[in-house]
Amino acid sequence: MSRTDDLFALFGNSVSRDPKGKNARLHFFGSIPFDDGTRVNREDGSLVHPHGAHGNQACAHAAPASLRATVVAVVSINGGVGRSTLVTALSSGLQRLGESVVAVDLDPQNALRQHFGVDHQRPGVGRSSLLNAPWAGALQTGFAGSQVIPFGDTDSRQKEGLQRWLTREPTWLAEHLSVMGLSEAHTVIIDTPAGNNVYLHQALNVADIVLVIAQPNAACLGTQDQLDALLAPYLERARPPRCHFVINQVDDQSAFNREMLEAFTLRRQADALAVVHDDALISQALAFATDPLDNVASSQAGADINELCRLLIARKRTA
């Protein structure tokens, strides 16, 4: 029995393998509940969108509007895995490598505004959408010449109204992006809320590349079956997005981190698995709203992020 098997045994779980060691399946924790933002009150609210309700759910079968830019959806089942920090770093890293980047915050928590340190008084995704205004007016300057569209400040009533709207408008995101005048030179990086929610499905519906963010811990490992079920309809499309898994904030000095990374490698098997090492300077950049790549050029984390940026560029050219 390997050290990884010993780790699973501590939690009363096991790994089953076929005789050749292929198609391994991790049975870990069983079913773990997670937030489902699509569970909303269907009664009409005071915030009504101008196009009317179509009664459709945001789903993988909706026909998105034509998009020329490459769309990268950054997703996670678990919260607190450093998703928004990575979106910020990838935006800077790709822009430094010659890409034209637009970061879009679809998370009502509005975290990207804090990461980029942009004007909080200007309207963002939320208010612009409710007013049926184009998102181009919400663009702000990010790091290294990138651009960012924050979610913006919204109250609880506005959030509820927008969420009701999006459950009935599966092409909402595609339509807004398609009228921004983006070209093949652009990469749109979308930050989504953790869990299974309407914003996540809007992003997956237009994604060319999906980055799944997790940390090397038992909580993230335990939601992999739910994650697979969530992604399955999108990966079955005629032109499915390319999916990559990123294990974030890995500490090589931690034996537990190393063992959990081994477990993720076993669980994901042939899936592309990238690692971003832990670096306090990247985490601390949020406190000062500074570019997380400014001070990590020679660090392992900086090298990891640049390697991930090069991977995205390569995937973009072969899409």
Image (cartoon, rainbow, N blue to C red):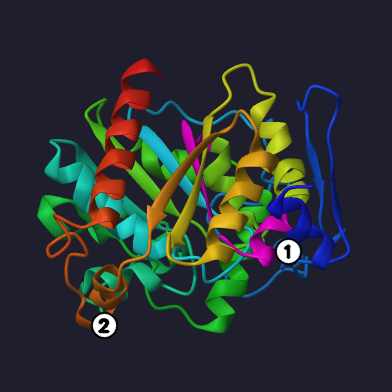
Residue 162 numbered tag:
none
Label 2 environment density (alpha carbons within 10 Å; few <14, some 14–19, many ≥20):
few
Q: Magenta residues?
A: 206-223
Label 1 Cα crowd, 10 Å radius (few <14 / some 14-19 / many 20+): few
**Is 288 situated above or below 138?**
below
Pinpoint residue 104: horizontal percent, then vertical percent.
Answer: 36, 54
Q: Is residue 221 magenta?
A: yes
Residue at figure coordinates x 69%, y 30% from the top left:
61
Which residue lies at the image location 30% right of the left edge and 37% below the top edge? 187
Res. 152 in view: yes
Quadrant of image for the C terminus: top left
Q: Amino acid at mark 2?
A: Ala
Residue 32 visible within the image: no
Q: Height in image: 206 above or below 198?
A: above
Image location of residue 253, percent across then percent down: 43, 65
Q: Which image quarter: residue 285?
A: bottom left
Query: In the image, what residue occupies the spot 57% across and 69% down?
Result: 79
Q: From mark 1 to mark 2, how far is it between C-alphas?
A: 29 Å
Upstream in sequence: badge 1 or badge 2? 1
Q: Is residue 203 magenta?
A: no
Q: Secondary structure at mark 2?
A: helix
Query: Which one is nearer the viewer's eye here, 192 or 180?
Result: 192
* SS for dot 1: loop
Q: Quadrant of residue 149?
A: bottom left
- Name the residue that disc number 2 marks: 287
Q: Looking at the picture, does residue 58 appear above or below residue 121?
A: above
Q: Amino acid at mark 1?
A: Asp
Task: Establish if 309 lies above or below 301.
Answer: above
Residue 83 in percent (x, y) is at 45, 61
> Residue 42, percent across and down?
78, 65
Pointer 1 and pointer 2: residues touching (CB < 8 Å)? no
The residue pinned by badge 1 equals: 36
